[in-house]
Image (cartoon, helix red, strand yellow):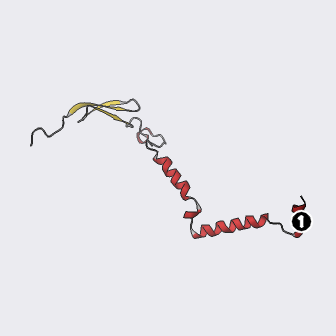
Amino acid sequence: MKANIHPVWYPDAQVSCACGNQYTVGSTKQKISVDICSKCHPFFTGEMRFVDTMGRVEKFSQKMTAASGTKYMSKKAKVALKVKLDAEEEAKRPKSLKEMLDKVKN
């Protein structure tokens, strides 16, 4: 083996979590800080929550709401939407000449 190429090994390196949990491991760094550990991770605690430190869940939600527009609809869905909008527009129109004249008078 070559001499002086390996990093220094710390057998009692301290790991500290954001939740306050601390434990000792072997590492090449003396102090390690982590965002989440087995004491606070949802898989180990049984909680139903998202662990999102970089905003990935919100970003995904925004993409999904943006994709729900008519640009990404199937042809059948577009036709059904057009039929529905046409029916609503037709329902707003006056049915007879009397209704049209009543609207003009009021």
Furthest residue toward front:
104
Q: Residue at x 63, y 70 (%)?
A: 79
Q: Residue at x 21, y 32 (%)?
A: 10
Q: Residue at x 23, y 36 (%)?
A: 28
* Residue 40 in picture, x, y percent from top left: 42, 36
Residue 18 located left or right of residue 102: left
The crowding category of the residue bearing disc 1, from other C-alpha atoms within 10 Å (few below 14, some 14 to 19, many at least 20), is few
Residue under label 1: 101
Q: Is residue 20 above or below residue 89?
A: above
Amino acid identity at mark 1? Leu
* Residue 20 in picture, x, y percent from top left: 39, 29
Q: Camera-side residue: 12 or 84? A: 84
**Secondary element at image label 1:** helix
Residue 8 located left or right of residue 17: left
Q: Residue at x 78, y 65 (%)?
A: 91
Instruction: Indicate the quadrant where residue 27 lies.
Output: top left
* Residue 41 in picture, x, y percent from top left: 41, 39
